[in-house]
């Protein structure tokens, strides 16, 4: 059982001007590979069990009763309780917003572009929507521009966003709410890298031999590297891929 070093592969550089050598995993026989995979699997399974335990603790969190907020949706003012559309549970993604900007936060735009089919939440009596500090007309124009399919609501004229840790000029975040009749409770919140667990993009990219290729990550010597966020789609990229021109509109 052994591993073998072989010469670096070659690949086109990011602008396709030349081939650059790039390191790669050592080549091993099948038995060695299976043993290494089994050792990694022990840690992967431990992480899965830890996530199960975290989810169990999350289900035991207390909750906070909220006032009767009014936001604005595509059809005008709407109470927070009515955004549930009769369901008992609601997830909100709070999209960063800069009034009047041609392009909004690339991270938020790219993250929310993943969510094109949300009907799977119906059997769980839940919805998932976007909340933004942008005025609703501007927000809906941007939604169409980048091809976003989630339902958007504005908290520009409501303290709701600020009260759930997404104030004007602030960052992004995720909140979860529970409805009991006309009373709404806040049950969970995260921001920063806490939102990664909601993304299939990072889960898939992290499976690749080179991973995210970001400089802050612990990768073997010689792995291809880019600056942090270097591989992320920016807002114009999302619009080009998913916007109305791609839908033939």
Image (spheres, helix red, strand yellow):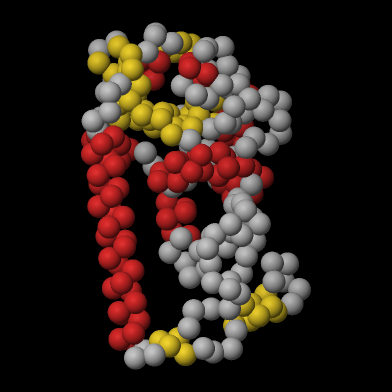
Vertical arrangement, residue 222 with respect to residue 233, above or below = below
Looking at the picture, how far across and down is residue 192, in whole percent?
A: 51, 39
- Residue 18 in view: yes
Residue pictured at 61% horizontal, 32% vertical: 142
Q: Quadrant of the C terminus?
A: top right
- Residue 74 in view: no
Residue pictured at 30% horizontal, 79% vertical: 35
Vertical arrangement, residue 169 with respect to residue 245, above or below = above
Residue pictured at 56% horizontal, 21% vertical: 167
User: Number of labelled discs?
Assistant: 0
- When asked about the image quadrant of residue 120, the answer is top left
> Which one is nearer the viewer's eye here, 105 or 211?
211
Judged left or right of residue 185, residue 143 is right
**Hey, which residue is sitting farthest right in the picture?**
17
Judged left or right of residue 22, residue 87 is left
Q: Quadrant of the N terminus?
A: bottom left
Looking at the picture, how far across and down is residue 100, in whole percent?
A: 71, 26
- When asked about the image quadrant of residue 28, the answer is bottom left
> Which one is nearer the viewer's eye here, 42 or 227?
42
Vertical arrangement, residue 199 with respect to residue 231, above or below = above
Residue pictured at 62% horizontal, 65% vertical: 225
Looking at the picture, how far across and down is residue 15, in whole percent?
A: 73, 67
Looking at the picture, how far across and down is residue 93, in whole percent?
A: 46, 32
Vertical arrangement, residue 76 with respect to residue 234, above or below = above
**Hey, which residue is sitting farthest top in the picture?**
68
Judged left or right of residue 189, residue 103 is right
């Amino acid at each position: 059982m052994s591993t073998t070093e072989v010469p670096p592969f070659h690949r086109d550089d990011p602008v396709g001007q030349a081939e650059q050598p790039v390191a790669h995993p050592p080549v091993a026989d099948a038995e060695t590979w299976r043993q290494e995979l089994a050792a990694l699997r022990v840690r992967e399974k431990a992480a899965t069990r830890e996530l199960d335990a975290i989810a169990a603790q999350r289900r035991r969190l207390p909750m906070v009763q909220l006032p009767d907020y009014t936001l604005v949706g595509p059809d005008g003012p709407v109470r927070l309780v009515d955004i549930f559309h009769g369901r008992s549970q609601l997830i909100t993604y709070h999209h960063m917003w800069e009034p009047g900007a041609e392009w909004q936060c690339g991270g938020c735009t790219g993250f929310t572009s993943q969510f094109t089919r949300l009907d799977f939440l119906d059997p769980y009596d839940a919805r998932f929507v976007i909340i933004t500090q942008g005025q609703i007309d501007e927000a809906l124009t941007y939604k169409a521009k980048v091809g976003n399919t989630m339902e958007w609501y504005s908290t520009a004229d409501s303290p709701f966003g600020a009260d759930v840790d997404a104030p004007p000029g602030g960052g992004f975040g995720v909140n979860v709410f529970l409805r009991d009749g006309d009373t709404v409770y806040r049950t969970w919140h995260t921001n920063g890298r806490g939102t990664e667990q909601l993304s299939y993009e990072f889960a898939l990219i992290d499976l690749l031999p080179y991973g995210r290729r970001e400089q802050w990550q612990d990768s073997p010597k010689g792995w291809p590297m880019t600056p942090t966020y270097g591989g992320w789609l920016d807002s114009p990229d999302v619009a080009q891929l998913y916007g109305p021109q791609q839908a033939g509109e």
